[in-house]
Image (cartoon, rainbow, N blue to C red):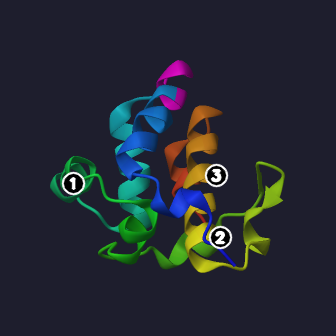
Amino acid sequence: MAKHRIYTTSFASVYPLYVAKAEKKGRTKAEVDQVISWLTGYGQTELEAQLEQGTDFETFFAKAPKINPSRTLITGVVCGVRVEDVKEPTMREIRYLDKLIDELAKGKAMDRILRKSAS
């Protein structure tokens, strides 16, 4: 079975869309970066390096410094698919990120987005 094309898509090409979605709803780029850092463990400098290098999604998640173990607390539907039901590991990580960006854009409190009360 062929890989989904999102795996070879540059993270840098989608990142501005995440930021635009958040900013459209009154959130900030810094909050998007905070969500990404929480999920992946990338610091600001490392994240910017990944963006500059044009790293694809598969590599972005494969080389993430520290995937957050609390990410399994992320549940819900993204694009009609329950994130907790996604079997393929890389696609599940992408869906987790999509869900976090959705929650940010919907105005949820950062503590809830980062699952602080549950962890």
Element at label 1 = helix
> Is the residue marked by circle 3 packed among few (<14), some (14-19), or many (20+) residues within 10 Å?
many
Element at label 2 = helix
Q: Position of residue 23 (x, y in %)?
A: 47, 24
Mark 3 / mark 1, whichever is N-terminal:
1
Which residue in the protein does label 3 denote?
A: 99
- Between marks 2 and 1 in the image, the one whose residue lies nearer the viewer: 1
The magenta segment: 21-26
Drawn side of residue 99 relative to residue 86, left or right: left
Task: Identify the amino acid type marked 3.
Answer: Lys
Mark 2 / mark 1, whichever is N-terminal:
1
Q: Main secondary structure of the magenta part?
A: helix
Which residue in the protein does label 2 denote?
A: 73
Determine if the magenta segment contains residue 90. no
- In the picture, the disc for residue 90 is none
Residue 49 seen from this side: yes
- Between marks 3 and 1 in the image, the one whose residue lies nearer the viewer: 1
Q: Position of residue 105 (x, y in %)?
A: 59, 33
In this rendering, the answer to whether 63 lies above or below 116 is below
In this rendering, the answer to whether 110 lies above or below 66 is above
State the residue lying farthest toward the front. Answer: 2
Residue 116 seen from this side: no
- Between marks 3 and 2 in the image, the one whose residue lies nearer the viewer: 3
Which residue in the protein does label 1 denote?
A: 53
Q: Position of residue 110 (x, y in %)?
A: 50, 45
